[in-house]
Structures are given as structure tokens and as C-alpha cells.
Image (cartoon, coloured by chain):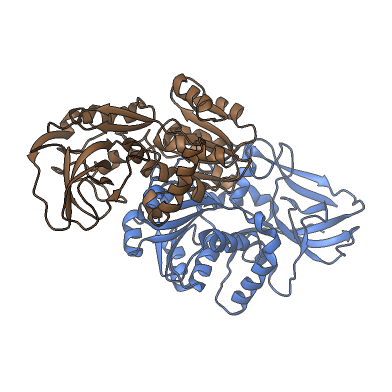
Chain colours: A brown, B blue
Amino acid sequence: MKNKQWRLASRPVGEPTAENWELKVDDVPDIEEGQIKVKINYISLDPAMRGWMNDSKSYVKPVGIGDVMRAGAVGEVMESKSDHFTAGDHVYGSFGVQQYAVVGAEGVHKVDPNLAPLPRYLGVLGMPGMTAYFGLLKTGVPQKGETVVVSGAAGAVGSVVGQIARIKGCRVIGIAGGKEKCDYLIQELGFDAAIDYKNQDIKAALRDACPQGIDVYFDNVGGEILNTVLTHINFKARIVLCGAISQYNNTDGVKGPSNYLSLLVNRARMEGILVTDNTKHYGEAAKDMAGWLNGGQLKAKEHVESGIENFPDTFMMLFKGENFGKLVLKVEHDT
Amino acid sequence: MKNKQWRLASRPVGEPTAENWELKVDDVPDIEEGQIKVKINYISLDPAMRGWMNDSKSYVKPVGIGDVMRAGAVGEVMESKSDHFTAGDHVYGSFGVQQYAVVGAEGVHKVDPNLAPLPRYLGVLGMPGMTAYFGLLKTGVPQKGETVVVSGAAGAVGSVVGQIARIKGCRVIGIAGGKEKCDYLIQELGFDAAIDYKNQDIKAALRDACPQGIDVYFDNVGGEILNTVLTHINFKARIVLCGAISQYNNTDGVKGPSNYLSLLVNRARMEGILVTDNTKHYGEAAKDMAGWLNGGQLKAKEHVESGIENFPDTFMMLFKGENFGKLVLKVEHDT
């Protein structure tokens, strides 16, 4: 049984290119005591992966040169020498960009394909959903009637942030690229307004869409959008820093928000979040999320591409804003 | 009785110059019901005044062209038609850059020249002291054993921040300009270390002085110092934004902190403060501060310049780092 894997060949400078990746075909190793062998079905593609390719201190170790690229994924247990899993279980774990994984039980948990389609466990019911839930509610602390703005609003995290804010009784404005995504936010997800950053003047559009100013801004993009939002925040506003996808491929460094003194004028705060700080409370969040999904208040959308060979190009869709919903890669197997 | 006043003649672009000011000699108006007439003894010179000269939305209205420059001051009541004050009272208020003021009672409070010299009510016992107290304790929330870094550390606010942090059992590092100020921080105020930003490499010096990283940073300066501190912060660090004196006179805009994503990596926060949000609690703070002063744990230092004619040059000392301690202007009177 052969295992196609994408390994990190070199570290990108700016945009990742084909040279940064190596497609390797390896044997699937035998499993040892405590391990499981997983046939991977869907791989999660996330902006954070770009950061893991850099050789810099962060919240996790960089992926090593020559290592299989780190990625969350869902799959089926083929063989188990762990007390926690049996063959046939469906599981989520950090299985990497490959067809098969042999891993220990730590950090792996079961998912139920009868309750939701597998890709959903990489989106609303997975890390992006938890990121949105805890980032918005714990750090953004939106109050009923407040105005919440979210960027990357049609993406995996942003679409959930906006919907939860709407459920909590806020006025919700999404920033996304293109008319199709903006229409979707308003018509399908119930956002109050949407701003098309590719075709609108963000400053003027924010002023129109947020006549009462901005109380919470959930930032997935950084750069000029963050900087412009800062000019419209209210007294005691909260800015949740979740990501800065517009900056990850800059070759001349990250652009800092020159309007940051608006935090001083408005006694506002800007705070970074990481989903894994909340592992102890995932259960409560999952219960809320499942309730909202079942009640039709929360909608999920996945963007599925196919074929592990297509990983490098599919990954780049994130940075071009080409995915519409949570981006996952469906893995096919020869056997 | 004639009143020398400094009025705002035009708005500065970059550094204020002589052309932005007009020295006017006016009559002191008669007082009306509810008002007091004050002979001003000391005028407070603060970095925030630079912001009030700009025509931009902020936490207070800009000073109008032709208006007496806004400034906190202490003086003596000469005549009162207010129930709250009688002639001979010493008072603090926003009296402006002039020799005499006629104002209503609102925002004016008595100070006692027998308890402390008058200039102290513009420093440790005034706005800068309160700013340090609430900014550090309420927003910085330093815990015993944590590392606290403060910039502008020999200034009116910074010197108090560092001393309160020391009183609370923190390791305290001050950033200031020049050996004399740095020696003072360590030898007189009990800071654990001091960094001379004019003569040291800040990044290397911070690494040496903060082997356990930085838990709280109280920022008075912005610019490169803020940006460098961001590379050394700890998990859940708090950055208190109090000012950005390095940026106030920039003609090409404020420089944003390009390392702001360190807030994300470290799940840290950056939050703006303004002293006047705490007016209800000034009493408690003053009690603490007076206790520390009397116990010798908190030391005060004022830098007194003389002559209202010298206001424009004296004001510029703030931006050149030429003041050593709280900068005040002593007002002389012809009568």
C-alpha cells in the first residue's frame, strides 16, 4: 500500500510556489502499540498553514524541511492498536497532507458521519467553527444591539462569526471579495450588510453600513481593511485578531496598522486568539453549534476540491480568495 | 490687570513652531455668578497637548484657532462668585496657558499647598499620577513576579508606573533617554534595570533585561520601541497604550506596529486608556498614592521652568526628551 504525501521541500519567500513542495510516494508504515492507521478522506486547508511553513517562533513549531505538511484531516481508522479506537471509526486529527497516516491517539477524536457530512468536521464543527465561537464570544464579547464587523466573512471562520453575532442580536456587516459572496452573506446567512472589498471603497462603505460605529471587529485579514476599520471603532470597541491573510505572503514584511492610536482615543482593545486555548470548553461550544445548525440558524458551506495531487494549487486558492466556504481537499485512494 | 495668554495661531504640520502661537495681552474679565477668578501659579505641560492642536476627532475637542491653549494648571482663587470656593483657596483646573483665568466651578478642585508643593498636583498627585495608577493597575493588571516594561520611564507618567509596579512586586524595566535618567531610575526609583534608547540597541537590551519575557508594557512613546517590545512579549501579555510621543510630530503619518501579529501568537492584548474614565475612583487612588509618598515608596520629581513667555520653547522640551521629571511652567505676575 503506497502513500502519496506532500512534504515541505523549502521555505517560501512570499507566495508559496511549486518548488516549496515535494510529492513523495512512501510505504505506509506498520503500526505500533498505541497507534492507529487512518485512511484520510478530507484534508483541511487553512490560512494558518502558511505560518507553519516559516522558520519562526510561533504558537506551534514550524514544519521541518522534508516533513509531511501539517494539516487537520478526517478519515477512517483501518487498523488500531489503541484502546481508544477501533477499525471503522471515523476520526479527526492532525494527520497531514497525505493519503494515510499512522499516529498515536493523542489529539485524535471520533466524529460521526451520520450526524454530519465528514467535511463539516473540518469547518463549522471543527477548528474554524470553534475559532469563531470562542474568538467572538469570549474575546469580542458582543452585546445585543451592537455592531459587529467581520472580514473574510464568506470564509470558514468569518461566516460562522457573522452568524453567531446575528444569533446574539447584533447588527452584522461582512467584508468579502466579490458580489457573489456578498449576496450570499445577506441572502443566505442573514447578514445586515456586506462590503465587497474588491469593488467598493471600504471607508465609505463602512461609514454607510455602520451608522452607529463599530463595537466588535473580528479580523481575519489585517492590512488596509484592519487599518480602515480602526477609524470607525466606538468607545470600548473590541478587535479580535484571528489572522492576517493579506499579509502572510508579503515579501517586504507585515504592514502594521498605522491607525492603532484609535485604540487610545476610544479606549478600545485589540487581542489575539488561538482556538486551542479553549479545548476544555469545546464540548459546550459544540452543543450550542449543533443546536443552531439543527434549528437552521447556522448554515454551513464547504468548498470541496479533489485529488491529493492538486494540494499546492488548491492551497493557493485561500490567498487568492477563490474558495467559497470552508476549503477542503478530498483524498482519493487507489485501493 | 493684564493677562498674558498664549493662543493657538495656526495648526502645526509636524513639529510646532513659533508661528503656531500668539502671545496676547488681554484684560482679565470680570467674573459672573458661579465663576471664580484664578491667579495661575504653575501650568502643566503634557504630550497630550500636541494632539489638542490638531483639527481631528479625538477624546476632546481640538483647541480652536485663536483660543487660549488648553492646559491643566494650579493657582489661587482671587475672587469667587461660586459657593464651592473662596478667595485664597488653591485650586487645580483646566485653566489654560495664561496668567489669570476666569472659569466656572466645574472640573475645578481644591489642592492643599501644606500637604505637598503645588507643582506636585500637576504630577504624581495629578493627572499623570492618576494615569499611571489606573492605566497600570486596571488595564496592565500586573501580578507579583511579572516583568513590567515602561517607556518614557523618567517622565511624569512613566516614573510613577514603574514605581507602582515595583511596589506591587514586579520586575521593572524602564526605557529612557540618556545615562543620567537611567541611573536615576535604578538608583533613586528602584527600577531593576533601565535601557537608554539613545545609546543602546533596544532589542538586545530588552533581551538582557527581561530574561523571562515581558508581561506588561506601558507605552508612552510608540514607534520603534513599541514595535521591538512586541517581539519579546509573553503569553497573555498586556500592552497599555497611553501615548505615542515619538509619533506626534511625524509629517508622514503615524508608524503602525508591524509586529502586531505577536499579539495573535501570544494571545496578548493592546488597550488604550484615558485617565478621565476613572474620575469616580480618583479618591481611592489618591489615598494609595499619598500613602506611598509618605512611606517613601513613591518618589516625585518635577522639572520647573519659569516665565510664561517661555511657553513655546518649554513645551518643545517634551518632544526632545529634555525634561527630567514632570514638566511645569512657573507663572510670574506683574502685580
Q: Which residue occupies the extreme bottom position in the image? A: B295
Residue A132, position in %: x, y? 44, 43
Q: In this view, does A312 lie to the left or right of A117?
A: left
Residue at x 68% of width, y 50% of height: B309
State which quarter of the image contains the C terminus of chain A: top left
Q: In this view, does A33 lie to the left or right of B77?
A: left
* Along the viewing direction, whichever of A276 and B32 lies nearer the viewer: A276
In the rendered view, would you say B67 is above or below B103? Answer: above
Q: Is residue A155 left or right of residue B55?
A: left
Asked where in the image residue B100 lies, by quadrant, the reply is bottom right
In the rendered view, would you say A142 is above or below A204? Answer: below
Residue B287, position in %: x, y? 66, 72
* Along the viewing direction, whichever of B321 and A209 lies nearer the viewer: A209
Residue B15 in view, yes or no: no
Q: Is residue B291 left or right of residue A124?
A: right
Asked where in the image residue B115 lies, by quadrant, the reply is bottom right
Residue B171 in view, yes or no: yes
Asked where in the image residue A171 lies, by quadrant, the reply is top right
Residue B236, position in %: x, y? 42, 57
Residue at x 59% of width, y 28% of height: A209
Image label count: 0
State which quarter of the image contains the N terminus of chain A: top left
Residue B3, position in %: x, y? 80, 50
Residue at x 54% of width, y 30% of height: A190
* Along the viewing direction, whichever of A249 and A325 lies nearer the viewer: A325
